[in-house]
Amino acid sequence: MITYYWPPSGGAGVQRMLKFVKYMPDFGVRPFVLTIHEDKAFYPIKDFTLLKDIHPNLKIVKTKNTEILKVFSSLLPKKEVPHSGFANHNKNTFASKVLRYLRGNLLIPDARKSWVRSAYKEACKLIEEEKIDTFIISTPPHSSQLIGLKLKKKYPHLKWIADLRDPWTDIYYYKDLLHTNWAKKIDLKYEREVIEKADTILVVSKGIKEMFTDKYKNIEAKTHAIPNGFDEDDFKVPSNPPKDEFLISHTGTIAESYNPIIFFSALEKVVSQYKDKCKIRVLFVGKTSPNFKALGATYHVSNYIEFKDYVPHQEVINFLKNTTCLLLIIAETTNQKGLLSGKLFEYLAAKKPIIAIGPKNGDAEEILNTCEAGKMFSREQEEELVKYIGVQIKEWLKNPNLDLQNNKIDSFSRKNLTAKLCKVIYGL
């Protein structure tokens, strides 16, 4: 398992590989992990609580590396590592535009490409010492898949599984990198080589699978969709929804491309209708763009909204379990129907009604309907969204615990999903 992001790095992408590794031995697969040493890495967020899921006997090789991104991020006004979609930075400043242009045209495919050399060297050692027969590379950063190109060339008999957690040149914030045509061509060449030369492609949704199979010929048979999920071990904490307020919570990063205006506009109407009947509060936990935070004032609901910065994963689960409803916003992009974040599955595990904003007839709506866990609204359905939240408030006034009472989410447990991955590894 080759992954740049590994605890103490935090975030949803870390958990995908971490949980696969946790449950692989249950299905007869012995995992090894190759990652970057935490002292040399440059993570947007850290979460030391994830270390509890690492078995003490797991062999982990950590490489040393000079991180170019440290130099790059030192030039940013906040001196922070950019989050997905640059959610923690104002993209409209001149400095941001210059640095995004440099990032998009000098660091291809991405700013962590410098890790490829040292990771390849250590991967060769590990393969030969442990007689490895399969290697899985999970990205982003998509530059890590270049390790796979080098390994497959040296060890053509090994099975290479490329796990693409996000689209590559079709990622929703790709245009924000201000690529020149020359840079786009190089990036697309890397993507094509990986897609064509990897023995197996893993993606997180049917929509992303269709995106790749439409884009590249003859890869249907080797492309598999295994979504993110939830770990039952993480959700053993009791549910304790508030009785004195109707609380809607959102966890995770929100970039400008999420286009949440419909929610703020709907919230303004909901507050107007129900503020005399109950206390209403909306909580956002995680990194959010500056422009997003300003929307509260625009729609006169600032007094009903609270923001908290990133918190460790276990604390996130506490927020999920101690709320009335959950808010899911899917980024407004070309490939939005295939977007399935790890957040959705942890929302399902929390068993709270989900108020979702995103594409109709997409993968996320299908899962919500299958699990009877909430409802999806397009950005043109503000009136319906207002009515739906109103219905939830009326139900809450009768009974402040709206927790769902079904077990239709079991197929998305991390253990069951690892079983599917192990079948792919075995070629079943």
Image: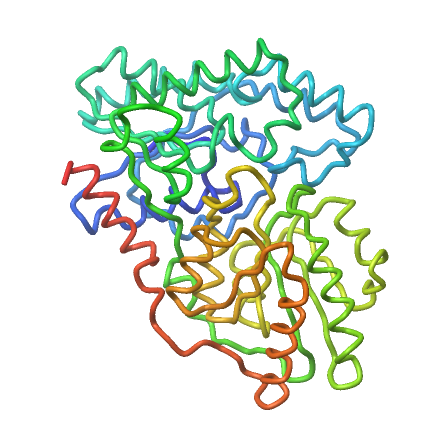
14 vs 151, left or right, is: right
Q: Position of residue 363 (x, y in %)?
A: 43, 51
Q: Position of residue 5 (x, y in %)?
A: 47, 36
Residue found at the far top of this picture: 182
The picture quadrant where one finds residue 394 is: bottom right
Residue located at (54% from left, 82% from top): 401
The picture quadrant where one finds residue 144 is: top left
Camera-side residue of 352 and 267: 267
Q: Position of residue 300 (x, y in %)?
A: 85, 63
51 vs 129, left or right, is: right
Give the image's coloring scheme. rainbow
In this rendering, the answer to whether 167 lies above or below 248 is above
Residue located at (42% from left, 30% from top): 35
219 vs 29, left or right, is: right
Q: Position of residue 198 (x, y in %)?
A: 29, 23
The picture quadrant where one finds residue 210 is: top left
Q: Quadrant of the C terminus?
A: top left
Q: Quadrant of the N terminus?
A: top left
Residue located at (27% from left, 30% from top): 200
In this rendering, the answer to whether 149 lies above or below 391 is above
In this rendering, the answer to whether 428 lies above or below 250 is above
In this rendering, the answer to whether 353 lies above or below 130 is below
Report the number of discs.
Answer: 0
